[in-house]
Amino acid sequence: MNNQGQGFESLIEFLRKLQANNSKAWMDQNRKEYQRVRDFYVGWLDMMNIELAKIDPNYYDTPGKKAINRINNNLMFHPNRPVYKDHFGAGLDQLSKQGDFYVEINTQDVFIGGGYWHPDPKSLRSIRQAIDYDGERLQAILNKPTFKEQFGALIEADSLIRAPKGFPEDHPQIDLLKRKAFAVSCQLPHKILFEDVFNKEVIRIYKEMLPFRRYLNQAVTV
């Protein structure tokens, strides 16, 4: 196992212990270990930030400390959640929290996703306008064989029963127009974290997802 694999092994072990002892008291006692595995993950993100910028001329520079999400759960709006998340998550190529390239290491697997999960009303309206204009382009991206093999379909989410206001029921892309979320994801087994191929696999998935993310990001920024 290489040094990177050992770092991920320590990170996962910490998350498992946190999952079994999810409290501020435990975290305070294990703060040094938390900081050590967090620093490792930030360092890996810094490296991926550089590598992804090499292959994507429109990549938005996102250093690890900006990319990584807080491990604390927001208890103000979700008081029943545990104090801490049971994963380390981060968004690369991040102009905003929506539309980024998300990489999460949790206690079960590696989760990679991207797109817009329940975007704000303005962004959702812009995405629908883009679909109305050239939704066949988005549909072609979703139907690409390698894309479907990697991600399957869009992540299941709530949809409107009727066409959104201003769009006809017989619109050729009515199913997309009714959606309230536009995101895809895939999972990788933990074992890949300990193999030399992991970084290359993340880059490959990034490239496969890129046309989908660019379509949506362009829609909300026009």
Image (cartoon, helix red, strand yellow):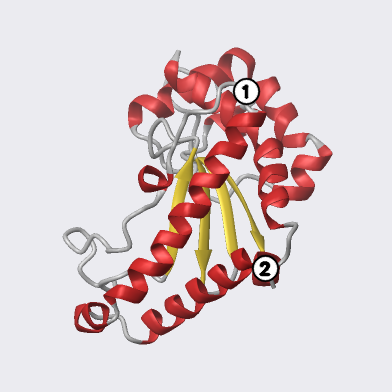
Query: Which residue is disc 1 drawn over?
Result: 170
Q: Earlier in the sequence, mark 1 or mark 2?
A: 2
Q: Is residue 210 above or below residue 67?
A: above
Instruction: Determine crowd level at label 1: few under 14, some 14-19, many 20+ residues with C-alpha closer than 10 A.
Output: few
Residue 205 percent coordinates (x, y): 69, 45
Query: Which residue is disc 2 drawn over?
Result: 2
Query: What amino acid is at disc 1?
Result: Asp
Taking the view exactly as shown, the residue that stands out farthest to the bottom is: 20
Instruction: Determine crowd level at label 2: few under 14, some 14-19, many 20+ residues with C-alpha closer than 10 A.
Output: few
Query: Residue 145 lies in what quarter of the image?
Result: top right
Q: CA distance from mark 1 to mark 2?
A: 56 Å
In front: label 1 or label 2? 2
Judge by depth and name the residue closer to the eye, 37 or 124: 37
Q: Is residue 206 visible?
A: yes
Residue 42 percent coordinates (x, y): 44, 54
Judge by depth and name the residue closer to the eye, 181 or 31: 31
Query: Residue 14 lies in what quarter of the image?
Result: bottom left
Quick one: SS at disc 1?
Answer: loop
Going by the image, does 154 lie left or right of 62?
Answer: right
Q: Is residue 187 above or below residue 93?
A: below
Residue 62 percent coordinates (x, y): 44, 37
Residue 60 percent coordinates (x, y): 48, 28
Disc 1 vs disc 2: Cβ atoms closer than 8 Å?
no
Taking the view exactly as shown, the residue that stands out farthest to the front is: 3
Q: Is residue 202 above or below residue 169?
A: below
Please name the residue shown 44% across and 76% down the image: 15
Judge by depth and name the residue closer to the eye, 144 or 42: 42
